[in-house]
Image (spheres, rainbow, N blue to C red):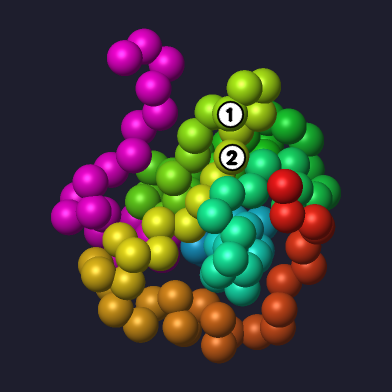
């Protein structure tokens, strides 16, 4: 389908891709917000209230999506992100727990 976003299959996600995606402080912050908010099934990209422009925000979410950490879906005029929690836990057991244990709770805006 034209315009459909690329999401790698779980078995194709590599630890190197995941770690490279998490190496950026903004992307780590996005994932931490999602890990700390297990009840939020989807959040709009703007709800993370990151201090970057729209094109940079889009870039960060693309990197996370292509690394296999998040799934993005278009909902009308917005794009929503969700953590691929089950896929990550199956592929890299304990990784999300390490992310939770690392540092402090991220700053986050209201869930949308």
Image coords of residue 66 (percent x, y) = 39, 42
Q: Nearer the viewer, residue 62 or 110?
A: 110
Task: Judge left or right: residue 47 versus residue 66.
Answer: right
Tag 1 secondary structure: strand
The residue that appears at 46% across and 83% down in the rendered structure is 97
| Other-residue count near label 1 (Cα within 10 Å), few / some / many at <14 / 14–19 / ≥20 | few
Vertical order, 6 against 42 (above or below): above
Q: Residue at x 64, y 48 (%)?
A: 43
> Residue furthest toward the left?
11
Of the image marks 1 and 2, the number of the one nearer the N terminus = 1
The answer to whether residue 40 is seen in the rendering is: yes
Quote the CA–CA distance across marks 1 and 2: 7 Å
Q: Is residue 61 above or below residue 74?
A: below
Q: In this orientation, which residue lies closer to the viewer: 102 or 90? A: 90
Is residue 32 visible from the viewing direction of this image? no
Q: Residue furthest bottom?
A: 101
Q: Given contact means CB atoms under 8 Å apart, are the residues at marks 1 and 2 in contact?
A: yes
Q: Could you tell me which residue is drawn at 78 percent across and 68 percent down?
A: 107
Image side of residue 98 versus residue 30, left or right: left
Count of residue discs: 2
Q: Residues within 10 Å of mark 2 (few under 14, many from 20)?
A: many
Q: Where is residue 64 in the image (x, y as percent from the top left)?
A: 48, 49
Residue 100 at x, y = what percent?
55, 81
User: Which label number is shown at residue 92?
Assistant: none
Segment tinted magenta in the rendering:
1-21
Indicate the quadrant where residue 27 lies: bottom right
Q: Name the residue under label 1.
A: 75
Taking the view exactly as shown, the residue that stands out farthest to the top is 2
Position of 73 with respect to 37 (left or right) is left
Tag 2 residue: 80
Q: Magenta stretch containing residue 13, yes or no?
A: yes
The residue at the point 44 percent across, 76 percent down is 96
């Amino acid at each position: 389908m034209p315009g459909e976003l690329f999401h790698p299959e779980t078995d194709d996600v590599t630890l190197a891709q995941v770690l490279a995606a998490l190496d950026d402080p903004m992307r780590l912050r996005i994932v931490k917000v999602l890990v700390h908010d297990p009840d939020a099934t989807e959040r709009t990209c703007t709800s993370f209230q990151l201090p970057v422009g729209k094109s940079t925000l889009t870039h960060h979410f693309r990197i996370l999506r292509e690394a296999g950490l998040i799934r993005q879906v278009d909902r009308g005029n917005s794009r929503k992100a969700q953590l691929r929690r089950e896929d990550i836990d199956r592929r890299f057991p304990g990784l999300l727990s390490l992310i939770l244990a690392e540092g402090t709770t991220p700053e986050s805006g209201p869930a949308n």
